[in-house]
Image (cartoon, rainbow, N blue to C red):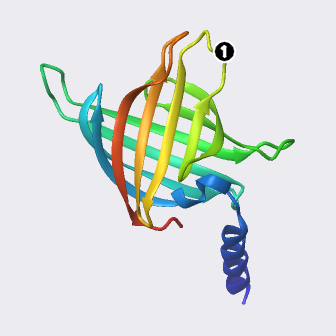
Amino acid sequence: MMRMTIAAFFVCSLLGQDFGPAQFLVGNWAGEGGGQPGQGAGEFSFVPDLQGRILVRKSFSAFPAANGKPAFRHDDLTIVYRDETTRALRATYYDSEGHVIPYSVKPADGGVVFVSEGASSGTRFRMTYTSTGKDTLKFKFEIAAPGKEFAPYIEAAAHRQSAGK
């Protein structure tokens, strides 16, 4: 009986969580695309954690050797959460290159956009996820050099492999 009660509580906590414009991202995804680092493929997941209080994104991208460059892999982790005071969605991004980047998370046409916080005098980053169907999306990662506009760095398409736990 206790197991059933715990399971019911867990399911209800996930069903009741609202990650706003990022809700459609919950699940496991695979994709491929390209850009300045080259043509690559990878996987990512968005999974509720801490009893549904945060959304954890884990991602990796693998790029084969090309044009004299060795093969490489990029791993990252993003924690999406609601600000305690404003209830606005925010995120913190960490990667295998040592970057730690705070983001604001807002709705975008048909999806959600993560925009790095900080002065426009520094390098800025923008990640946009756009739903293209029930189980498909487009992803765009852009970088803006200090004083410049955002320019595409990576563009990819992904499909859902399974719903998140």
Q: Is residue 36 above or below residue 87?
A: above
- Point out the residue furthest to the bottom here: 1
Taking 160 as reference, is 39 left or right? left
> On the rendered image, what quadrant is the C terminus found in?
bottom right
Q: In the rendering, at what x and y percent does residue 115 appear?
A: 59, 32
Q: Residue at x 44, y 34 (%)?
A: 141
Q: Which corner quadrant of the image does residue 18 belong to?
A: bottom right
Task: Name which residue lies at 71% across and 63% down.
Answer: 17
Q: Residue at label 1? A: 119
Please tell me in which quadrant of the rendered image residue 62 appears: top left
Inspect the image, locate mark 1, and give the three-letter code of the amino acid beneath it: Ala
Query: Residue drawn 32% across and 50% down?
Result: 31
Q: Nearer the viewer, residue 161 or 153?
A: 153
SS class, disc 1 = loop
Query: Image check: 44 left or right of 31?
Result: right
Crowdedness near tag 1: few (<14), some (14–19) or many (≥20) residues, C-alpha within 10 Å? few
Q: Residue at x 51, y 13 (%)?
A: 148
Query: What quarter of the picture does the N terminus occupy?
Result: bottom right
Foreground pick, 60 / 36: 36
Residue 115 vertical position relative to residue 87 in the rendered view, above or below: above
